[in-house]
Amino acid sequence: MAYEELADAIMKDVGGKDNVNSVVHCTTRLRFKLKDESIAKEADLKALDGVVTVVKSGGQFQVVIGNQVAEVYNTMVKRAGLPDAGEVPDENNATSAAAAQMSLLDRFIDLISSIFTPALGLLASTGMIKGFTAMFVALGWLVPTAGTYVILNAIGDAFFYFLPVLLGYSAARKFALDPFIGMAIGAVLVYPSLVALAPINVASGTPPLMTVFAGTFLATPVYATFLGIPVLMMNYTASVVPVIISVWLASRLKGWLDRRIPTVVRTFLVPFFTLLIIAPLTLLLVGPVVSWLSEAVSAAVIGLYSLAPVLAGAALGAVWQVLVIFGLHWGLVPVGVMNVANHGADPVLALIGSASFAQIGVVLAVILRTKNQKLKGLGWSAFISGIFGVTEPAIYGVTLPRKRTFVLSCIAAGAGGGVMGLMGSQFYMMGGLGVFQFPSMVNPKGVDAGFTGALLACALSFVLGFALTMFLAKKTDIDPVAAPADAQTLAAATTGTASAEAKADASATAVASELLKAPLDGTAVALSTVKDEVFASESMGQGIAIEPTGHEIFAPADATVVLVFPTKHAIGLHTDRGADILIHIGMDTVALEGKYFETLVQQGDHVTAGQLLTTFDPAAIKAAGYAVTTPIIITNTGSYTNVTGLQAGPVTHGDALLALDK
């Protein structure tokens, strides 16, 4: 589907432009804030070619696209006339009302993701540059005094060093403040003269004017005052929380000033008073207090990790992908950034480094085991994305829908996390994901056991995820047989009278090419035209549908009857050549509770091609308000390379209808 077509379809299914408060995108997802989520057509969105899935989390309606999300986003913004990521959303209307209805956790996750999402790409890329630079030094390819090193280190370090300026921008957008005011507040925090004030005085031996909180762990020398008030100088370079709190205060102050300053002078007097009040307040109070609190949080997190690093690694590695699904992983991002800023390294986010390798190990095994060509194509795309740490296509497109494979990936990720905890792996800078995370894990002092442990952990997770899926996952876990709401038992019964699991396993492999005959008279139509999403989307399997002109259902091949519904409206067959077939008479006709249907065979009977199976009364069913469109579904479609419809238009029972190619 072209970007224009997909963008238009998504905008239509989320309720149109008028239902969108704002939209941004991250690595793989469009993150909508909708005025009314009930208007959005979630099922239709999931069915779009180009949409992996839909997730509702953190107060956001998230449409998972995959690697092409930026192109879809840009196309959608342009065609729908939406404000792009550089424009300030109107937080004073329905967005604020929607936020007020969110839970405290959802509001926190929304806050963190909204502020950090615009910066993550650059944070990762510059971290990779700095990581590679450190690796080159460790390998002896560069020396720290070389001009090449100085320039590369500056490119890699500048973004992180001036992070308060950049977070000031994104925080201002989130809080509906002029982004340049947010940037100005961040710039004050990293202004060179202020940053160097304490170090210069310490280096020169200048005695402090005073020491506040002397004799406690908060003891801080004072080298400057503001209007006679001691300024507790902290190092705010690479800090996260102080600028966010200050920008939020500035947004509140701006709203108060807007109501009191005349419009004619508001343009320059509002930022004048905002900066004049908030910047000193940040340096005098907000900055020191928040810095102490953030250092305490960092120390507490690292302290807990130190108690049982292997257990912490196994637990966090195992649940990380679950956190990603619900968007809760955002809560740990600031902790990792604070740890790097306060302690020079972060062991927490490092523990999840093996999760993407566990995913791609499982995905590779699924690719090798599945016979579904569409799944193979999706799997290779997800595998390549996962190498670089983008796992949403693997999670939503491959492992999560199969449940057991997702659990196996979590087990493999937990094992890798445990190894990382054991070996003391850490991030020494915020960098890339997947294979690009390794440069960020090189100790500036040289390659150590933590780096080696990271390599071993990721290799272990990949191999373990692959092996578990190859040898422990059942065939039906790889190519599951789906069923509509009124046919939940079909998947377990489609192969005759043996045990359900044994039959399902056999049906996935013991198939041969086959030609199926039409089971009734009528008009053959494409499955996509059926007015039932389960059938039309082919989520249950490929096949064809017939608009009946007759009233009898005949066997399409020699087969065993594996399921006869008590309501008689559907019958399941397992052919002698291995095909699993569901013939479903009408739409929602389960509600008739067997009225107007008569079944002439029983479960376990062996029937021959053309044998009468069921009769029904099309006129009475229609009079009761139900469609009689009859899908003929191959529920083990994944066992075939092709399922081809041979008829379109009038068809008589016994005519060639479907070709199944092994």
Image (cartoon, rainbow, N blue to C red):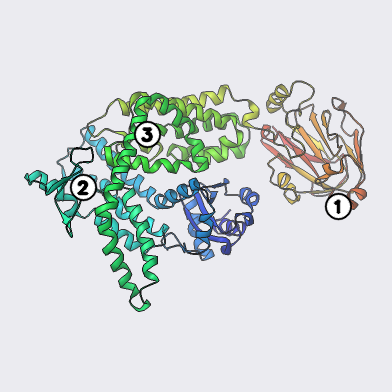
The residue at which mark 2 appears reads as 151
Q: CA distance from mark 1 to mark 3?
A: 59 Å
Which residue ends up furthest to the left in the rendered image? 205
Mark 1 and mark 3 lie on one chain; the one further toward the N terminus is 3
Q: Nearer the viewer, residue 371 or 616?
A: 616
- In the rendered image, residue 40, in percent from the top left (x then y), is placed at 62, 55
Identity of the residue drawn at 34% across and 39% down: 297
Q: Which mark sits nearer the N-terminus, 2 or 3?
A: 2
Answer yes or no: is residue 646 visible: no
Q: Residues within 10 Å of mark 3 (few under 14, many from 20)?
A: many
**Which residue sits at x=53%, y=38%?**
395
Q: Quadrant of residue 659?
A: top right
- Residue 130 in picture, x, y percent from top left: 27, 42
- Mark 3 residue element: helix
Whether 354 is drawn above or below 167: the answer is above
Q: Determine the residue positioned at 51% across, 55% down.
A: 99
In the rendered structure, which amino acid carries the disc numbered 3?
Ala
Residue 409 coordinates in the image, percent (x, y): 51, 30
**Residue 629 in view here:** yes
Rounded to the nearest angstrom, the CA distance separating label 2 from label 3 is 27 Å
Q: Amino acid at mark 1?
A: Gly
For the point 47% across and 62% down, which residue is it?
91
Whether residue 273 is situated above or below residue 131 in the rendered picture: below
Q: Which residue is mark 1?
A: 625
Mark 2 residue type: Ile
Question: Disc 1, disc 3: CB below 8 Å?
Answer: no
CA separation in Å, label 2 and label 1: 75 Å
Q: Position of residue 21 (x, y in %)?
A: 52, 60
Left or right? Give the position of 516 relative to 643.
Answer: right
- Label 3 belongs to which residue? 350
- Is residue 120 shown left or right of residue 520? left
